[in-house]
Image: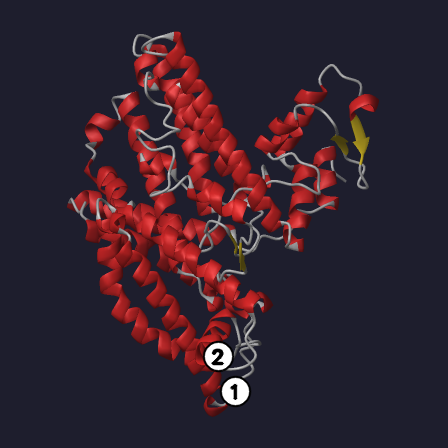
Amino acid sequence: MYHDAELGRIAADPRPVSAVSTGAGVAGLMGVIAWIAVARSAGMDGPYAALLNLVACGLPMIAWSLLVDKVHRRASTGIDWKRRRPWREMLDVSLVKLAGLFATFAGIALIYATGRFYWQGNFAFAMWCFTRAAPVVLVLTVPYVLWLDRHLVEPKDGAWHLGAWLCGQPGWEAPAIQAHLRSWAVKGFFLAFMLAIVPPGFGDVVRRDAAGIWRDPVALTGWLTTFMFTVDVAFATVGYILTFRPLDSHIRSANPFAAAWAAALICYPPFILMQEGGPLDYHPGTSDWVHWVSDHPLLWWPMGAVLVALTGVYAWSTVAFGLRFSNLTNRGIVTHGPYAWSRHPAYLSKNLFWWLSTLPFLSLGSWLDAMRATLILAVVSGIYYWRARTEERHLLLDPDYGAYSAWIARHGRVPRLLARLRSFGRSAPHHQRCDETGQRRDQGHPGRLLDIAVGRLDDRQPLQIDERHDAARSE
């Protein structure tokens, strides 16, 4: 018997199982913390140490996933380890698939070579990594494909269809080729960006003077937020690298809707609109929170604590994905951690951080500057709302996400808190109805946009974010 009625409702209506366990993310986080501690003690703040931070993040998660979660045994991998086809039977299929994969690699390399921005600034580091990793990847791809194809339930995947089309073999299908190219477009575009921003944040975290940090709330806030963004970048980068079926972290599907791609790409270089001097740069005429509270020391600690907490939620949202983080893809539905509270904790915490850290309604110049900055930042937040809606359109194609979305609408803390605020002072019969589970849900109120912003949506149009750090990390 439950003394808390809410606990009883949750027990009768359990949260859908997450595709990744809490332990996987915790293992990766412990690896990152341990390596940063070693790097700080040894003064290793360079790019090689930053790359080793990715290793420290990824290896513990791989070990946990295979040894504890045993993800390689899941049916969702598409692998039947009991089946071992003869080499000769699969050789033709594997060779055609390799042709498709190598053509994909060549296409991505051509794009990198053509785009001049990829060889400038921080992107030059990403290209340095790719040029040195390419020979190893090309060599290891061959035995990996030959080995895995013997165990796959359906070995003729998108790479095979592309290879069959290139080789003039029958049986290829255009939708399979398009899905394959979308998946690799996601990986090629976002991995380059993530690698580009790995060294700067890591180096900053390692170089900061510990003695000065703990005495100054502003300095402590800056270091903690940088540390958590470094964690976020490490997990996101590892996620883009480790898309493998034996880890059950492969891409199930990439978003097929053009609006989703448009909404995401304008948040990342070279298409980013929020960068300094860009059309959605909301910083001119404003200052940061430190300037506005500098004359009020009593506000330093609470303001810094709120910003650190928001950054913590943002980083936690990435850690919860474990090996599976990626933009514009479905790699398994995440239901634990902050996603048990809200469908999109990353978007919510990120936008709140921007509003509180910038305070755009306060201006160094005229009231017109304040109005302009406020309006532009509102447009930026609107873009994230747009991104969320387009991502939902894709995720709702997965029944697992539909089940999670319905559950979070009934039990998510953020949606329930909003429901209480909205219903305050109003009678239930005019604004609420009961769904099939007996939970009350609002309809038809003009505050629906706010509902979406915190994750409370009708079951047919839920909202989640599995997006990554963009404008804030590129500024």
Q: Position of residue 105 (x, y in %)?
A: 35, 66
Compare marks 2 and 1 and give the one earlier in the sequence: 1
- Nearer-the-camera pick, 156 or 324: 156
User: Left or right: 20 with respect to 40?
Assistant: right
Residue underneath mark 2: 149
Quadrant in which the N terminus is drawn: top right
The residue depicted at 67 percent of the width and 54 percent of the height is 399
Quadrant in which the C terminus is drawn: top left
Q: Position of residue 78 (x, y in %)?
A: 56, 71
Q: Is residue 34 visible?
A: yes
Quarter occupied by residue 201 = top left
Amino acid found under the numbered disc labelled 2: Asp
User: Left or right: 365 with respect to 242?
Assistant: left
Q: Are marks 2 and 1 in contact (CB under 8 Å)?
A: yes
- Nearer-the-camera pick, 313 or 60: 313
Q: Residues within 10 Å of mark 1 (few under 14, many from 20)?
A: few
Coloring basis for residues: secondary structure
The vertical placement of 372 against 196, above or below, is above
* Distance (Cα) linking label 2 and label 1: 8 Å
**Residue situated furthest right in the rendering:** 429
Which labelled disc corresponds to residue 344? none
Which labelled disc corresponds to residue 85? 1
Amino acid found under the numbered disc labelled 1: Arg
Element class at badge 1: loop
Q: Residues within 10 Å of mark 2 (few under 14, many from 20)?
A: many
**Residue situated furthest left in the rendering:** 43
- Number of numbered discs visible in the structure rendering: 2
User: Left or right: 439 with respect to 106?
Assistant: right
Q: Is residue 362 visible?
A: no
Element class at badge 2: helix
The vertical placement of 168 against 2, above or below, is below
The vertical placement of 404 against 438, above or below, is below
